[in-house]
């Protein structure tokens, strides 16, 4: 579904992504693992159009995304859950969900499955986003991305700073989206066990380079784990 080929991304002179290639297959969960500062967020920002690439290409269903703006990529079916969640603290849960409508031309409704996946959002529709726990905010951020009815859902460290029981809920929700809707999922993570339980495919990023690609079962190999230890 998503084909990333030979991508280079710079911040000024800093070379954050080096000749990165990655294939994200339709209906699968692909997890990119890596330590702090290796380029995971940069990769996702390149995919969603928030950061330009200097070389290489990113294709969605064989169509180059080129210089398409973030809103245009959302219309093509890419949903994004950013690192740190980026919830509007003074807006209610309902209003936060509705901000997801902004790039849409039609069908500005919250799909029922958002509330089925995360019933807490329905219970708290009138509560301010800033008054939710970190885990509830993460559920809200995923819900906001789902209102755009994406075919490809991209998540930046969805487990960061979240308690284990909510991590399990989020894992279940991601699996449900793949199994029930055939949604394609790409997530970046530092949390190895979460990826082991969830992913079909993994890639490991180290200092801006993809140093390993394979099936999730490979994660138990010593040579793979070595890339993830400091
Ligand atoms: N806006 C920016 N300007 C300059 N350098 C940046 C910028 N954003 C990121 N970088 C640098 O690019 C490199 C990759 O950063 P990136 O945020 O993509 O890594 P990451 O793997 O997502 O890290 P983390 O797990 O800590 O979020 C780092 O060296 C970082 O300091």
Image: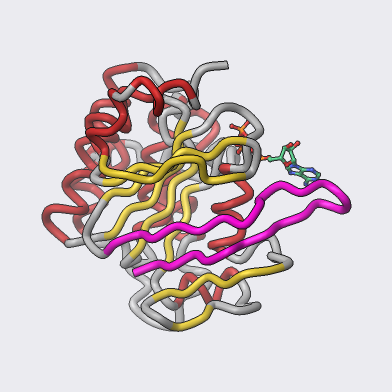
Hey, which quadrant is residue 220 in on the image? top left
Q: Residue at x 28, y 33 (%)?
A: 218
Residue 154, position as x, y percentages in the image: 43, 53
Q: Is residue 95 left or right of residue 136?
A: right
Residue 141, position as x, y percentages in the image: 44, 45
Q: Residue at x 26, y 44 (%)?
A: 174
Where 130 sits versus 53, above or below? above
Hey, which quadrant is residue 51 in on the image? bottom right
**Quarter of the picture holding the C terminus:** top right
According to the image, what is the colour scheme of the structure? secondary structure
Hey, which quadrant is residue 22 in on the image? bottom left
Q: Front-most of 199 and 125? A: 199
Residue 216, position as x, y percentages in the image: 26, 37
Residue 125, position as x, y percentages in the image: 36, 44
Where 123 sits versus 19, above or below? above
Q: Is residue 6 magenta?
A: yes
Q: In this view, does 210 lie to the left or right of 196?
A: right
Q: Residue at x 55, y 40 (%)?
A: 83
Q: Is residue 173 magenta?
A: no
Q: Quadrant of ligand 1?
A: top right
Q: Front-most of 194 and 219? A: 219
**Quarter of the picture holding the N terminus:** bottom left
Q: Which residue is drawn at 45% across and 77% down?
A: 75
Most distant residue in the right direction: 13
Magenta stretch: give its range: 1-25
Where 206 sits versus 71, above or below? above
Give the tally of numbered discs: 0
Most distant residue in the left direction: 180
The secondary structure that dominates the magenta segment is strand
């Amino acid at each position: 579904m998503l084909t990333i080929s030979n991508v280079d991304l710079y911040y000024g002179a800093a070379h954050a992504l080096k000749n990165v290639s990655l294939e994200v297959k339709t209906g699968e969960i692909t997890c990119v693992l890596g330590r702090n500062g290796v380029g995971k967020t940069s990769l996702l920002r390149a995919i969603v159009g928030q950061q330009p690439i200097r070389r290489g290409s990113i294709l969605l269903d064989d169509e180059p995304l080129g210089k398409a703006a973030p809103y245009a990529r959302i219309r093509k079916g890419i949903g994004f859950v950013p690192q740190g969640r980026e919830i509007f603290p003074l807006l209610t849960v309902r209003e936060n969900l509705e901000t997801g409508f902004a790039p849409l031309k039609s069908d500005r409704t919250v799909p029922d499955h958002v509330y089925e996946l995360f019933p807490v959002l329905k219970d708290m529709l009138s509560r301010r986003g800033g008054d939710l726990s970190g885990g509830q905010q993460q559920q809200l951020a995923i819900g906001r991305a789902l209102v755009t009815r994406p075919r490809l859902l991209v998540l930046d460290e969805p487990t960061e700073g979240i308690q284990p029981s909510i991590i399990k809920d989020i894992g279940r929700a991601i699996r449900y989206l793949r199994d029930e809707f055939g949604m394609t999922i790409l997530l970046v993570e530092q949390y190895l066990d979460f990826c082991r339980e969830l992913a079909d495919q993994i890639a490991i990023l180290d200092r801006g380079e993809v140093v390993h690609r394979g099936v999730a079962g490979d994660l138990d190999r010593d040579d793979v784990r070595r890339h993830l230890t400091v």
